[in-house]
Amino acid sequence: MANTSGKLQELKNILAEVSDLERAAALLEWDQETYMPPGGVQSRSEQFSTLLRLAHVRFTSDAVGGLLDDLEDELGGRPYDSDEASLMRVTRRDYDQARRLPADLVSEAARAGSVAQPHWQKARKESNFSLFAPYLEKNVELNRRIADALGYQERPYDALLDRYEPGMKTADLEAIFEELKRAIVPLIADIARNADAIDDRVLHKGFDPDLQLAYAADLVKRLGYDMERGRQDLSTHPFSSAFGPGDARITTRVSRDFFNECLFGSIHESGHAMYNQGMGQDIDRTPLWGGASPGVHESQSRLWENLVGRSRPFWRHFFPSLRATFPEPLHGVDEEVFYRAVNRSYPSFIRVEADEVTYNMHVLLRFELENEMLEGTLKVKDLPEAWNSRVKSYLGLNVTNDREGALQDIHWSSVSFGIFPGYTIGNLVGAQLMEKARQDLPDLDSQVERGDFAPLLGWLRRSVHRHGRKFTPNELLERATGKPLTAAPWIAYVRQKFGALYALQKVPS
Amino acid sequence: MANTSGKLQELKNILAEVSDLERAAALLEWDQETYMPPGGVQSRSEQFSTLLRLAHVRFTSDAVGGLLDDLEDELGGRPYDSDEASLMRVTRRDYDQARRLPADLVSEAARAGSVAQPHWQKARKESNFSLFAPYLEKNVELNRRIADALGYQERPYDALLDRYEPGMKTADLEAIFEELKRAIVPLIADIARNADAIDDRVLHKGFDPDLQLAYAADLVKRLGYDMERGRQDLSTHPFSSAFGPGDARITTRVSRDFFNECLFGSIHESGHAMYNQGMGQDIDRTPLWGGASPGVHESQSRLWENLVGRSRPFWRHFFPSLRATFPEPLHGVDEEVFYRAVNRSYPSFIRVEADEVTYNMHVLLRFELENEMLEGTLKVKDLPEAWNSRVKSYLGLNVTNDREGALQDIHWSSVSFGIFPGYTIGNLVGAQLMEKARQDLPDLDSQVERGDFAPLLGWLRRSVHRHGRKFTPNELLERATGKPLTAAPWIAYVRQKFGALYALQKVPS
């Protein structure tokens, strides 16, 4: 036992060092997106890759493997949710996954990404897919080789998906996404027919940027984002990153001519940051610290952004102070008009600008196309055609150029198949958690209407945040809601909300 | 030869990795002083010490020693100022110095510093030296053990001084400091008798902080500080730090009620930053990159702050725009009054607030006291008395409490004897370089008066900046000015400038 505790400490020391290196790398990245002067690019990329390389070398060392071998028999037998058993289980999973990838393949994939990215940029700029096609072909091949190296039982995509969403299976996602499609494609068409029901011109009436930033910072604090352990800065693309339980930051951007960008962006990122702020101190500097998966992380940002931040009780609480802050653009606008405006839904070409209803369709088509390219049933050269026909059938739109079509995302310029599903998983998990939270907190709506967000945040802390990476997404959902991932709560939610908004039914007060 | 170039590359790869880790650590520190939220302290100190520990372990590894052994015969024979011979020489010096310190002693010293610092803070707050004395005694003993471990021929202080100012000898500094004392103590007394000759109340008339920051940022750009490869932020204590040749930043602070703080602080830090921006790309990510010593670094900041920034030609150029920016506080003030105000000299208790003439006296007494404590001729318990009597004799002031006396600096709360002399070395080197620059650039004053700083900056780049750490301070001075360190140029400069300012002689136009 003395031997065990000595070895456990030794393992924890190595893991803490790895965590310090990764967090330092994350700060380097934060700085690069916020304050770094243009001249810093070259040195920064050297520093960043040195830190990540050292972290990788240390984590995949034989020392870690040996300590896991020595410790997991004894510690792995402790209760499943104990810190010790979880540390063994999750560290083993990460370790085996990292060791299965040959160093050569990892660097070949990294290099392929650096080479492809400028070609993707050029192709997108010129809206000419053929300029990018050879690089995408190479990336598809590398994704295939990575899947082979990692190993899988049924589908090559399983291996890639598991890197981001542990335990998730391609076939299960396909079934869930089919269900989504059956429910949402008709809803999107219905909404399109009633497009005139919502007028969102008020959002474009000119909101002073400094006031927007101050209002957003104050609002996210009221939700429960602790600014003593975080901060808000500007960046071109909003993001959230954490360098420890006491330092989880958000960035935002602001546009005078479009209100949603700053406020809903800030709420979204603070959802991520509150997750990071809620992780247990006891799992700090171990592989248990962090989000259960990108999808679960996204559930926290989308829950606050949409299920809370675009709800009627939310605006019942905040609209008076919003109108006091922006009397000119909101002159003559009432709470109901504003609530409807921020919920306008309409099919569009660009994923990152998509609204709550249509967003998942963008993800779904990418998931399908990644699978088909990986399995060889879709040739890279035929991608734009496949893309365009799916946009037509899911969103009812005719894509007229690849810039707004198959070339719009940066993701495929690197070797990263398997990331996209997380965005939809986030939406579904958010709704599934919210359904349960409503059962456990029957007064939730009136709490939100009073500006009392502590009960909801407390529920999320207990059910999700404090566990960090202890559980896989499905384990976490089973524990929190009694079920693995399901689309039903999200479908019910959008049907009800957007049915009401667009069918012009009388809205309950 | 193929073998040599292979091994040289291997050595450079390790050194580049060490440089990346140290620069990442420097960014962590920059962030801590500028933007980090309060909650980040704990994680940040873990990350910082992990990065520095890994850098130290890597640099002091047997691998580096072996590569140096293999390479220095062949490469060390190349021309003294070649990149290869310099790399061998400087890396060997750093390596041997680092290896001579036992790891136990290094960590004991680090721990002693962490333990002592809160006691120093408390002692200073209560102005009670006896609360700090036992910790200072421990630190003196550790300084002694470090000197013994490093080794020295004549004086224990030589070993400590060499860590910061390579090649500098205690006895040489003593002779230089004696010369300074003989010249400056009477000058200080003369100035004190004519104190009324300068009125600096204009500096306290209330200058809008935002305008001060903008004016300072614009001014340092005009000096040659490249903001595409740097930036200016706020921090409690101004500093400069560099994370590569393309990213050398400054911080500043601003006070509505005291003009000097922001502008002269910004000029000072931009002097450091321009040095870092001027180092050759060819020595990037090697031990040759960086300042030749803290003293030489300080020469660049003090040269721009005082020899340029407090000169008459400088204000002939900038005063019109300054008055246009701050019409209210500068109402009725002319260039001459302003020039005199920013050059007011008077004895004071606190080193960091001291003016150009008196500053070196503060350094000198610390240098003397460190030596005496280290050699045992002064007991720690007698430090305040020794301090106070020296302040009386050098500055003519009666110290009435230890808070403004022996407890004022943070330095002695850690194990760091040997740092103080660099501040005075900086002043002397600055004047010595400037004397030579004036010979080489006979039109310097009129260039400055026209706001053309490029010739001076170019001269500094060629003579100092591009060499990084290739040469020791004295080697650098010999190459640039034909002489090792001497006090004569600085003494001549202050005698002339302050003689004119305070004897109310007619000032040449």
Image (cartoon, coloured by chain):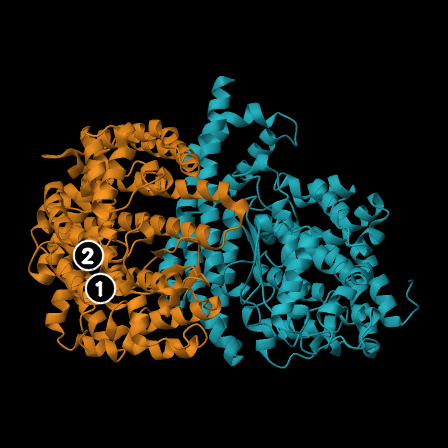
Chain colours: A cyan, B orange
Q: Are marks 2 and 1 in contact (CB under 8 Å)?
A: yes
Asked if residue B361 lies left or right of residue A330, the reply is left
Check the residue under mark 1 and report the chain it is in: B
What is the secondary structure assignment of the residue under circle 2? Answer: helix
Check the residue under mark 2 and report the chain it is in: B
Whole-percent x, y for residue B110 in the image: 35, 34
Give the amino acid type for the residue marked by disc 1 in the picture: Tyr
Residue A204 appearing in the image: yes
Answer with mark 2 or mark 1, whichever residue precedes in sequence.
Answer: 2
Q: Quadrant of the C terminus of chain B?
A: bottom left
Is A383 or B377 nearer to us in this picture? B377
The residue depicted at 35 percent of the width and 38 percent of the height is B402
Is A88 or B448 nearer to us in this picture? B448
Whole-percent x, y for residue B336 in the image: 29, 74
Residue under circle 2?
B190
Is A436 or A384 nearer to us in this picture? A436
What is the secondary structure assignment of the residue under circle 1? Answer: helix
**How far apart are the two marked residues, 2 and 1, measured between alpha carbons?**
8 Å
The residue depicted at 69 percent of the width and 74 percent of the height is A348
> Quarter of the image holding residue A200?
bottom right
Q: Residues within 10 Å of mark 1 (few under 14, many from 20)?
A: many
The numbered dot on residue B502 is 1
Whole-percent x, y for residue A234 in the image: 55, 64
Is B483 or A474 nearer to us in this picture? B483
Give the amino acid type for the residue marked by disc 2 in the picture: Asp
